[in-house]
Image (cartoon, rainbow, N blue to C red):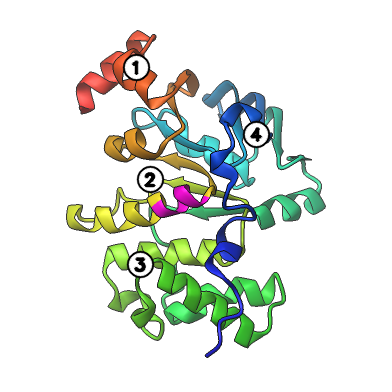
Amino acid sequence: MTTTHSLEETTVTNPEVRKIPLEERDDIIVCENVFKWFGNFCAVNDVTMSVKRGEVVVIFGPSGSGKSTFIRMINRLEEHQQGKIVVDGIEMTNDLRNLDAIRSEVGMVFQQFNLFPHISVLGNITLAPQRVRHLPKAEAEDLAMSLLERVGIPEQAEKYPAELSGGQQQRVAIARALAMQPEIMLFDEPTSALDPEMIKEVLDVMRELADTGMTMLCVTHEMGFAREVADRMAMFDEGQLVELGTPDQIFNNPTEDRTKLFLDQIL
């Protein structure tokens, strides 16, 4: 089988982007005064932040603090009810054309792998490129195999999800998201459902993605990963963005008492 896609083509338009200082990159995600309610409960409360192209932002905080809801709004899996969200120059509205355009630019990896159990690994990865991007089957399979090589499990292509370990399934889920050639990757606690020995293999794939210049928002409690990979870290609590700073600032000199307390409890 001849591969027609280079690995660089499947992950990032410009692999040199991370060599450009953050302050010189454009904002690829802009959120202004964003709110989200579930009934009377305010899950996301007046959040304003932006993410630079090629930036890795780790979002952390206690359970129920609005982290997952916030990143799910970035590709409209949850609808914000007040404020503005702009993704790669496109404002998130109820216009389905905008929604389709944004979702084609944003890949997402969930806590649960959400693979189709009745379809092979190869089929899981090729389904969306064929149906949404209209890639020919052979081209989609070439792309899928290059991505399975990248995440380290090309030998699993013909297996079904139930035959794989949790770590392998999550790596398939990452490959499936990358198959749509997104500009942005969202990770919603991608290791929290894994056994401890499987966490490293998934984090290694995420580290490699970060090194290529992929824009990434990662909800995670993996503080070692955050310290090593993140450009900035965002502390959420009770739906609010409590503190935003570099890993050095967050770990060594947090300004907010709530951040200090949370870190004291988990480190």
Residue at 60% across / 40% down in the picture? 73
Q: Residues within 10 Å of mark 2 (few under 14, many from 20)?
A: many
First along the sequence among labels 1 and 2: 2
Q: Residue 97: x percent and y percent?
A: 81, 53
First along the sequence among labels 4 and 2: 4
Q: Which mark is residue 189?
A: 2
Magenta-drawn segment: 208-212
Secondary structure, mark 1, is helix
Q: Which residue is mark 1?
A: 259
Q: Amino acid at mark 2?
A: Glu
Cα distance between the residues tagged 2 and 3 = 14 Å
First along the sequence among labels 1 and 3: 3
Prevailing SS of the magenta stretch:
helix
Q: Which residue is mark 3?
A: 169
Q: Left of 105 or right of it: where is 163? A: left
Cα distance between the residues tagged 1 and 3 = 33 Å
